[in-house]
Amino acid sequence: MSTQHIYKIIFHNRDQVYEIYARRISQGSLFGFVEVEELSFGETSKIVVDPGAEKLAAEFSGVKRSYIPLHTIVRIDEVAREGVAKMSTVKSGSVTTLPIYTPGKPGTRE
């Protein structure tokens, strides 16, 4: 019996924090990016409508694979159950972007 892994990926994009769920993640073939596949947005109730979850589902509609910059990722968790994707606004200055190593960047040793 194979276990189906589910990952919760939290990352920031501009002034928003995204929380998405995926079945496959990897380092990917692009330097500095995490490859996210088989996105899942959970089962939502037809009575209660979450505009953030619907906006995320629309934004990632038709996306087969997404490459998320490593320096925007806040956290990746392997979870037991899939939740509902969320999008929330961040107050200015509450998310710090970490510098990312770039080969051959001026001022660095090679």
Image (spheres, helix red, strand yellow):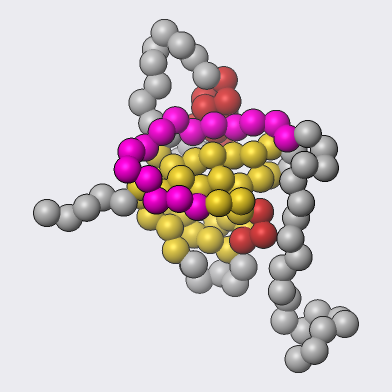
Q: Which residues are magenta?
A: 76-90
Closer to us: 38 or 88 = 88
Residue found at x 67% / y 59%: 71
* Residue 17 figure quarter: top right
Horizontal arrangement in the rendering, residue 44 relative to residue 56 (left or right): left
* One can see residue 64 in this view: no
Q: In x, y percent, where is residue 6?
A: 35, 47
Tell me the quarter of the image containing the N terminus: bottom left
Horizontal arrangement in the rendering, residue 2 relative to residue 68 (left or right): left
- Residue lying farthest to the right in this orientation: 107
Closer to us: 28 or 82 = 82
21 to 84, vertically: above or below = below
- Residue lying farthest to the left in this orientation: 1
Horizontal arrangement in the rendering, residue 56 relative to residue 69 (left or right): left
22 to 58, vertically: above or below = below
* Residue 33 figure quarter: bottom right
- Queried whether the magenta region covers residue 80, the answer comes back as yes
* Residue 80 figure quarter: top left
* One can see residue 109 in this view: yes
- Residue lying farthest to the bottom in this orientation: 110
44 to 60, vertically: above or below = above
Residue found at x 49% / y 59%: 35
- Queried whether the magenta region covers residue 72, the answer comes back as no
Q: In x, y percent, where is residue 51?
A: 57, 20
Tell me the quarter of the image containing the C terminus: bottom right
Residue found at x 87% / y 82%: 107
Horizontal arrangement in the rendering, residue 44 relative to residue 75 (left or right): left
